[in-house]
Amino acid sequence: MGEQAVTITQIDTGALYVSWAAMGTGDTGAAFHVPAGAKGIAVQCRSASWAGTCTWQASLDGSNWGTLVDYAGTGITFTADGVKFSPVVPMWLRPSMSSNAITLYCYAYVTNYGA
């Protein structure tokens, strides 16, 4: 259990690739402050062997967290590799792992900020 560091890479003008590596059971990703003006967020989780659940969390203040939702208003969670999109652009974003997780890699793509 712990907080995993976030790595931020600018991949184009107005686009960021944000990653948290080697997430395990009980781990939470370090909070990522979403840039002002961001218009889109896609989140992804990948693992060689799934045995847990990754929940994407959003916050307005970096202290109080709720589950990020997709276009249907459903909480964004993963139990297998996948990509999901959110119409919600929070101030803060992070992944959180639960139950018997095997090493997991979490990614977020943030687009059109400052454009």
Image (cartoon, helix red, strand yellow):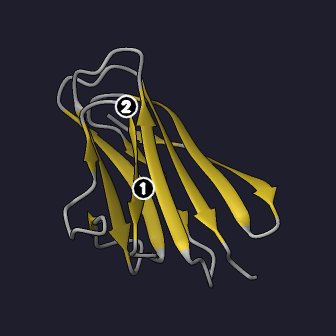
Q: Secondary structure at mark 1?
A: strand
Q: Is residue 107 left or right of residue 71?
A: right
x then y, percent, for residue 95: 38, 49
As drawn, 52 above or below 3 = above
Which residue lies at the image location 32% right of the left edge and 46% below the top edge? 96
Q: Residues within 10 Å of mark 1 (few under 14, many from 20)?
A: many
Q: Quadrant of residue 39?
A: bottom right
The kind of residue on which mark 1 rests is Arg
Q: Is residue 98 left or right of residue 57?
A: left
x then y, percent, for residue 114: 74, 82
Mark-to-mark CA distance, 1 and 2: 17 Å
Query: Is the C-beta separation of discs 1 and 2 under 8 Å?
Result: no
From the image, tell me which residue sits under label 2.
81
From the image, tell me which residue sits under label 1.
94
Q: Is residue 6 left or right of residue 88?
A: right
As drawn, 18 above or below 50 = below
Q: Residues within 10 Å of mark 2 (few under 14, many from 20)?
A: some
Q: Residue furthest top?
A: 49
Which residue lies at the image location 82% right of the left edge and 67% below the top edge? 13
Q: Is residue 65 left or right of residue 88?
A: left
